[in-house]
Amino acid sequence: MPSGAWPTLDAGWVWLCGAGPGDPGLLTLHGLNALRQADVIVYDALVQKSILDWAHPDAELVYAGKRGGKPSAKQQDISLTLVDYARAGKRVLRLKGGDPFVFGRGGEEAQTLVQHNIPVRIIPGISAGIGGLAYAGIPVTHRDVNQSVTFVTGHDQSGETTKLNWDAISKGSQVLVIYMGMKHIAQITKHLLDAGRPADEPVAVVTEATTPEQQVLETTLGNIVADLEASELTPPAIICVGRSVHMRQVLDWQGMMAGDAPRNLDPLGRGRPAEQP
Ligand code: SAH
């Protein structure tokens, strides 16, 4: 990394940084720059452990895991821990999975820091709902499929299915990317079917996206509940609903790297370009 051009993490500051969905190579250069400087790194369950190998050897690594349904550090405790470290003059890196401002409570943490007069820097990351799907060969937008995409969470603060207007979401967006959707998949699917989405609409479930453990289930709205029950898939998972899932038939680049042939060169029926002579 060229010296001089990169920001310095000063004592008493907290940098709130996205670590990307898993693959360490998806961390940003600002993230790497932060890891090399921080005295204290407070990281989440979804942060791939090998990313921490880039930490300064003397850095204190503090786990602040939050996994749905399991006992975990309270949000306010985490924010106040960051305040304490900063006030003790540490250079603090708060590392979160994906992007800190996408369903990650990063906004709340940053707000608490500012309320306590702690200076912050925000470092975005690649969100699982975009990068994770790309690793599964699914583009979140495609001209033949969607002009909008909706990112939605499968449950709200109370842990229940959100009081979202599923009818409006179903009708308003051709592609839905659902975070934290596994627990309530039966209700979510029912909402979507009730709102008129077809039972044969393609759905992909991508677990542990971008890691060596990544698995992809291709199914339909009508079959997803039974197929998930029959599978051994567990969270974290991104669920993508929409015809862009078909693109995986031609864009499963990880499968192709492993020697698989593309299943269908023209899954959306857009016609193939004329052969070049
Ligand atoms: N800030 C994160 C999202 C945090 S919410 C981001 O931008 O990606 C946690 C949810 O994100 C998980 O329940 C899951 O739905 C999704 N998620 C995060 N990392 C994932 C991964 N590697 N594979 C699949 N889903 C992931």
Image (cartoon, grey):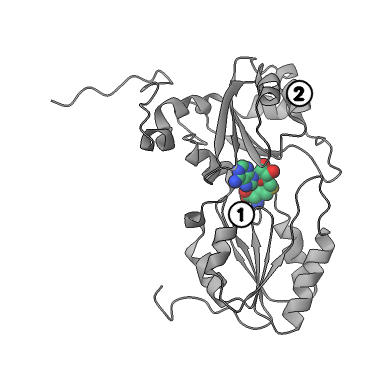
Is any part of residue 150 visible from this angle? yes
Q: Nearer the viewer, residue 270 or 189?
A: 189
Q: Is residue 257 above or below residue 72?
A: above
Q: Secondary structure at mark 2?
A: helix
Q: Earlier in the sequence, mark 1 or mark 2?
A: 1
3 displayed left or right of 77: left
**Looking at the picture, how far across and down is residue 266, in whole percent?**
38, 21
Q: Which mark is residue 191?
A: 2
Q: Secondary structure at mark 1?
A: loop
Kind of residue at badge 2? His
Q: Is residue 117 above or below residue 95?
A: below
- In the rendered view, tell whether residue 262 sits above or below residue 236: above
Q: Is residue 19 above or below residue 11?
A: above
* Location of residue 197 by image quarter: top right
The residue that appears at 51% across and 28% down in the rendered structure is 244
Whether ligand 1 has any atom under 8 Å from the Cβ at mark 1 is answered as yes
* Residue at horizontal 83 percent and vertical 41 percent from the top: 159
Q: Which residue is mark 1?
A: 99
Q: Tag 1: Cα neighbours inside 10 Å, few (<14), some, or many (≥20)?
A: many
Q: Quadrant of the C terminus?
A: top left
Q: Quadrant of residue 191?
A: top right
**In this picture, residue 44 sits left or right of residue 146:** right
Dots 1, 2 in contact, CB < 8 A: no
Q: Quadrant of residue 196?
A: top right
Furthest toward the left, the residue is 277
* Residue located at (42% from left, 79% from top): 3
Residue lying at 72% horizontally and 79% vertically, measured from the top left: 86
Distance of label 1 from label 2 (alpha carbons): 27 Å
Amino acid type for the residue under numbered disc 1: Asp
What crowding class fits label 2: few (fewer than 14 Cα within 10 Å), some (14-19), or many (20 or more)? some
Quarter that holds the N terminus? bottom left
